[in-house]
Amino acid sequence: MRWISERSICSGGETEFPQRIEHLWPHQNNRPKPAVGSGDDALARVMGDMVLLPDGTVLIINGVSAGTAGWEYGRNPVLSPVLYQPNDPLASRFQTLNPSQIPRVYHSTAILLRDGRVLVSGSNPHTYYNFSGVIYPTELRLEAYSPAYLDGTYSNLRPKIISPTSQAKLGMGRSLWFNSASQAP
C-alpha cells in the first residue's frame, strides 16, 4: 500500500516581524494550491501546535502571527485556536474557537489527554525564566481545552467500558471489555 499525502503545512518567519501564513492545501494530481485567503487557510501563525483529535479533526493552537521562534522575536499572539475539519466542504474546513486569555508563544505545547481533553501549557521566549519587564513573560499556567465531542449530548456515541466495572488496575492476562458506539444503549 502506498501512502499519499493529502495536506501540507507551510509556515515560516523572519526576524523583521512580517505576517506569515500557515496554510493547508490539497495534493491532488498536480492540482495548483489555492490562493491565500481562499477559505482553506488557518489563521496566520508560526510556532503553533497541532493535535490530532480522536474524531479525526485537528486542533491548531498557540503561536504568534508575526516574527519567528525564540529569543523575543515573536509578536502578536494568536489567542484563538482553530479546528481543522478535513471532511467539511473546502471553504468551511477551519472553525475559529473561543480564545484563550494567555499568550502562548515560543516553547508552548498542547497534548491530547486520555480523557479526550487537550492540555495546553508553556511559553518562554527568553533565554531564562523571565516573569516581568518583558512583552511575553514566562508562562507556567495550564489550560485544558474540551472539544465538542466531550459534550454530554454525545455521550451515547462514545464507547463505554463494561468490564471491569471498577477502577481496578489491569494486568497481564486480564481483559478489558467495552461496547462500541453502535452498541451503546
Image (cartoon, grey):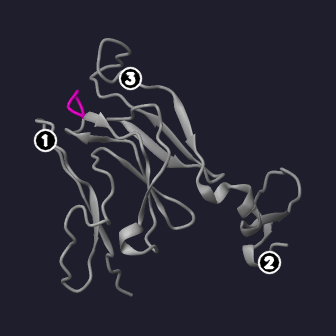
Which one is nearer the viewer's eye here, 41 or 54? 41
- Which residue position is annotated with label 3? 138
The local crowd at label 1, few if under 14, some if 14 to 19, many if 20 or more residues have their Cα within 10 Å, is some
The local crowd at label 2, few if under 14, some if 14 to 19, many if 20 or more residues have their Cα within 10 Å, is few
Whole-percent x and y of residue 176? 79, 65
Quarter of the image where one finds residue 164: bottom right
What SS does tag 2 mark?
helix
- Which residue position is annotated with label 2? 183
Q: Is residue 174 visible?
A: no
Quarter of the image where one finds residue 126: top left
Distance from the alpha carbon under mark 3 to that under mark 2: 47 Å
Side (left or right) of 74 relative to 59: left
Q: Residue furthest right?
A: 165
Tell me which segment is drawn in magenta.
70-74
What SS does tag 3 mark?
loop
Task: Give the numbered dot on residue 133.
Answer: none
The local crowd at label 3, few if under 14, some if 14 to 19, many if 20 or more residues have their Cα within 10 Å, is many
Q: Is residue 78 visible?
A: yes
First reached walking from the N terminus: tag 3 or tag 2 = 3
User: Who's the residue at 31% across and 76% down the image?
Assistant: 5
User: Who's the residue at 35% across and 12% down the image?
Assistant: 132
Q: Is residue 103 placed above or below 78 in the rendered structure?
A: above
**Kind of residue at disc 3:** Thr
Which one is nearer the viewer's eye here, 81 or 10? 81
**Kind of residue at disc 1:** Glu
**Kind of residue at disc 2:** Gln
